[in-house]
Image (cartoon, helix red, strand yellow):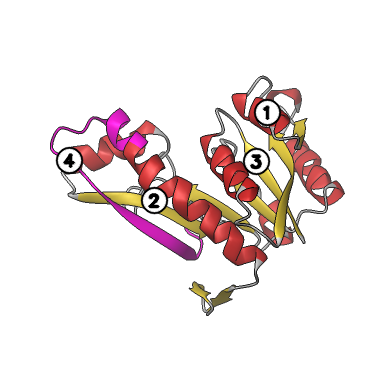
Amino acid sequence: MKKIVVLVSGGGTNLQALIDAQHRGEIPNGEITCVISSKEGAYALERASKAGIASRVLARKSYDSAAAYTDALLSALQEEQADLIVLAGFMTILDEKIIRCYENRIVNVHPSLIPAFCGEGFYGLRVHEYALERGVKVSGATVHFVNEIADGGPIIMQQPVAVERTDTPEILQKRIMEQAEWKILPKVVQLFCDDRIEVADGKAYILD
């Protein structure tokens, strides 16, 4: 049974999708054992509490430097014996030190079809604002492994979502969450825990 640690900063809707999938028995070889928040009072912590999942708060502002925060987070992950780390709206960039320790064991969900509208500065509603400004007909979500490049790790799974003429950033964000993020993130976590994801030559492949 693989131990899954979820990193959050806000409301935790993707965390809830994982909790719901776990309750439905869709992640038989994994268990969410801890939720770590970078902010005190994040609603994601309440979601964890309601689900009976342990949680920690490592507030970035409580540490004097990025290096000190990295060391504290790395220590927490090691104490929790994390097999898989899921970034679910975690608003702090992970240091290379953590990424190297957990190579191809950290996944992130991004609200676009990478490589479109991704990288530094593309987060939250900004992604959807740019997509609508560009006039794309299809957007969606991507789950990828995390490496040293923002949104640059191997792509594991993508789900397209149609863009409507009357969409606002908020409407498109909600549709992508419901039709893509909340579906493919739990699926990728299941596949990882089933040992069905392989990385070769910088690309991720799903094994039969």
Q: Which type of secondary structure does the marked residue at label 4 adopt? A: loop
Q: Which type of secondary structure does the marked residue at label 1 adopt? A: helix
Question: Which quarter of the image is occupied by the N terminus?
Answer: bottom right
Name the spot of residue 111 as percent of width and height, x first: 39, 45
Of residues 168 and 93, the one drawn nearer to the viewer in this rendering:
168
Q: Which mark is residue 45?
A: 1
The residues tagged by marks 4 and 2 sit, at their Cα atoms, a distance apart of 16 Å
Of the image marks 2 and 1, the number of the one nearer the N terminus = 1
* Mark 1 residue type: Leu
Which residue does the numbered mark 4 point to in the structure image? 164
Residue in the image at 17% along x and 40% along y: 164
Of the image marks 3 and 2, the number of the one nearer the N terminus = 3
Name the spot of residue 119 as percent of width and height, x first: 42, 48
Left or right of 88? Residue 6 is: right
Q: Which mark is residue 141?
A: 2
Residue 165 shown in magenta: yes
